[in-house]
């Protein structure tokens, strides 16, 4: 009989996943302090040394649980490559992130408690989905700020909304808080009307070409070179 597939550290894939799910369940029901190697081993039907063989230590186990959280969230994301309303698409993505955090408070806190979580493959995949939304906003002339700043604002407001909501007593959790934070994000990140009415690079080039005399960031030589490039793009329309 062929042996079961194994992870890079030598543990069977099924066993590793069972341990991660047991740890995630403990985390959800009893909090982070309950996720001890002994408790997880018992829940998964293993001996504690197996946890160390699979994950190295408790930190390695928690890292795997966080990755599991990112993967779960990623699976829940709906990607529309051509949404009818770019702003509503942004709102829907923000709402989904906040709803996931409110439904999984302990897991969400673990996922975003360490800066190193940004190395997660699932986190990176989720960021690509977000950046896709932001690029569509930019291409449609609806992005008010740079793409990187937009991503930071969207993330910061979503995390802030979740963590603030969870920190409040239940009787003080006003739904208006989430709505106002979301709409503040939308106002900060997007233009109410497209900055460029004509879709495509030619229209964007014409709009930028028209505003060049109003800015002073570029030197005269840089403006001259950029003007040549923009003229070429604009003439393709």
Image (cartoon, rainbow, N blue to C red):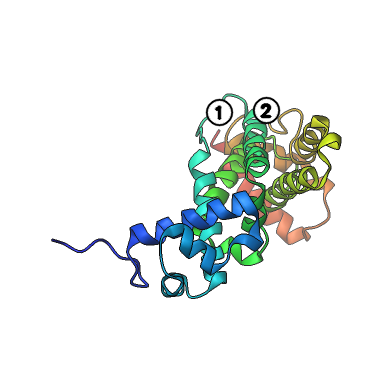
The residue that disc 1 covers is 83
Farthest residue, direction right: 172
Write down the quadrant of residue 31 in the picture.
Answer: bottom right
Q: Quadrant of residue 19?
A: bottom left
Q: Measuring 65% from the left and 37% from the top, which residue is drawn there?
A: 99
The answer to whether one can see residue 225 in this image is yes
Where is residue 153? Give x, y as percent: 74, 48
Q: Quadrant of the N terminus?
A: bottom left
Q: Is residue 111 left or right of residue 220?
A: left
Residue, disc 2: 197
Q: Is residue 227 above or below residue 181?
A: below
Residue lying farthest top?
Answer: 84
In the image, taking residue 8 as reference, residue 77 lies left or right, namely right
In which quadrant is the C terminus drawn?
A: top right
Number of other residues with Cα within 10 Å of mark 2, as a class: few under 14, some 14 to 19, many 20 or more: few
Q: Quadrant of residue 93?
A: top right
Q: Residues within 10 Å of mark 1 (few under 14, many from 20)?
A: few
**Reading the chain from its start, which is encountered first: label 2 or label 1?**
1
Q: Front-most of 187 and 45?
A: 45
Image location of residue 149, percent across then percent down: 72, 52
Q: Residue at x 84, y 46 (%)?
A: 214
């Amino acid at each position: 009989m062929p042996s079961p597939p194994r992870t890079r550290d030598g543990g069977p894939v099924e066993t590793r996943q069972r341990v991660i799910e047991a740890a995630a369940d403990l985390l959800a029901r009893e909090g982070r302090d309950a996720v001890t190697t002994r408790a997880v081993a018992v829940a998964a039907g293993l001996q504690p040394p197996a946890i160390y063989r699979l994950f190295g230590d408790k930190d390695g186990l928690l890292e795997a649980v966080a990755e599991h959280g990112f993967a779960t969230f990623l699976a829940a994301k709906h990607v529309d490559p051509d949404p009818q309303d770019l702003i509503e698409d942004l709102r829907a993505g923000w709402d989904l992130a906040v709803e996931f955090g409110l439904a999984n408070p302990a897991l969400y806190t673990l996922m975003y408690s360490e800066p190193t979580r940004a190395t997660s493959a699932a986190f990176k995949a989720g960021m690509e989905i977000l950046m896709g939304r932001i690029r569509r906003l930019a291409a449609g002339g609806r992005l008010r700020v740079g793409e990187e700043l937009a991503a930071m604002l969207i993330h910061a407001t979503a995390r802030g909304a979740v963590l603030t909501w969870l920190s409040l007593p239940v009787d003080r959790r006003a739904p208006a808080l989430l709505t106002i934070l979301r709409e503040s994000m939308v106002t900060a990140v997007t233009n109410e009307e497209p900055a460029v009415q004509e879709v495509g690079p030619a229209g964007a080039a014409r709009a930028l070409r028209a505003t060049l005399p109003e800015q002073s960031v570029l030197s005269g030589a840089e403006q001259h070179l950029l003007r040549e490039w923009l003229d070429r793009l604009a003439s393709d329309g």
